[in-house]
Amino acid sequence: MAKIAIKIKSTGQVLEADGGRLSLEIGDWLLVETSQCKEVAIVVDRCRLKEEFRENGKVKESEVEIIRKLTDKDREQYQDFKKMAEEMIPECQKKILRHRLPMELLDAELSFDEKKLTFYFTAEGQVDFRALVSDLASSFKKLIRLQQVGARDEARFLGGHGRCGQTLCCRKFLKGDLDSITLDMAQIQGLAAMGSSRITGACGKLMCCLAFEIEEYKKLARDLPKIGDKIKTEKGQGIVISQNVLQKKVTVELLDKSKLEVEC
């Protein structure tokens, strides 16, 4: 039995599932059955699970069964369900206004068996939407889930273009969880000095593309003296103040405060 980690598309939950004899790769789309309904899921790992799904060294069981890989017909049906869900957005928006809730509706998704309807929204803080859920359930006769998302997922839902002129990566091809982006990634690539506005995406967070080549930069940086290291040059001893990883060079500040670029 091949244990894999899958992400339920509508909830973002990462759960363990038995892959059985299916030949699965990370990124494969699946049709699965949970305790609530049939859903679309994505393979995010073939063996390791997030720490929150481990207890005392044992993997936490999850009630999910893989039915099959998504077929072409399934994908067409999924798009049909997507259109059906989008048609329900205006009614949900009316109810949000009627309940005077401070939330911005972004998107909707219908489960594969039409039992569950998920609405995605953003809000400044927590929102008490219990009355809204009851109202929606009464109107649509389905299990209702309201999913609050952050700024990065909001950009994924709305779409747009990055400073490169291309469609946002999160909208165009990134699947599953969006990787955590740190300022260290920008520093290793020599981009932090450009200022935060140059490395910030449409969502207001650090750009996802900072992670695309970071592992290669880390490998190259291992062969270079670290910033702050004291090294000897042809013009005397100095301190490394910056790195040019791709050109395999460092900038050194000498004792007389002059600067020298050194090839490593």
Image (cartoon, rainbow, N blue to C red):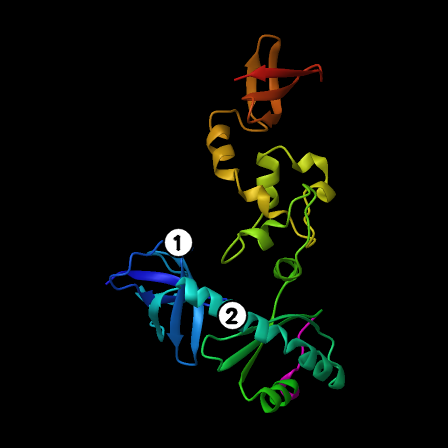
Answer yes or no: is residue 117 visible: yes
Quarter of the image holding residue 73? bottom left
Disc number placed over residue 107 in the picture, else none: none
- In the rendered image, the quadrant that contains the N terminus is bottom left
Q: Amino acid at mark 2?
A: Ser
Magenta stretch, overall SS: loop
Question: What is the x, y in percent for residue 36?
Answer: 43, 81
Q: Which residue is identified by label 2?
A: 10
Q: Which residue is identified by label 1?
A: 26
Residue at figure coordinates x 39%, y 63% from the top left: 71
Name the one closer to the observer, 4 or 106: 106
Question: What is the x, y in percent for residue 27?
Answer: 42, 55
Name the one closer to the observer, 243 or 158: 158
130 is higher (above) or lower (below) than 152? below
Task: Looking at this view, name the residue that lies furthest to the top.
Answer: 234
Q: Amino acid at mark 1?
A: Ile
236 is higher (above) or lower (below) than 148? above
Q: Are marks 2 and 1 in contact (CB under 8 Å)?
A: no
Q: What's drawn in magenta, residue-wise?
A: 125-131
Residue at figure coordinates x 30%, y 62% from the top left: 3
Question: What is the x, y in percent for residue 217?
Answer: 51, 33
Q: Indicate which disc, 2 or 1, sits on the residue closer to the N terminus.
A: 2
97 is higher (above) or lower (below) than 232? below
**What element does badge 1 sit on?**
loop
On screen, residue 101 versus residue 191, left or right, reads: right
On screen, residue 258 versus residue 71, left or right, reads: right
Answer yes or no: is residue 7 visible: no
Residue at figure coordinates x 65%, y 82% from the top left: 129
Callout 2: 10 Å neighbours few (<14), some, many (20+)?
many
Question: What is the x, y in percent for residue 115?
Answer: 48, 82
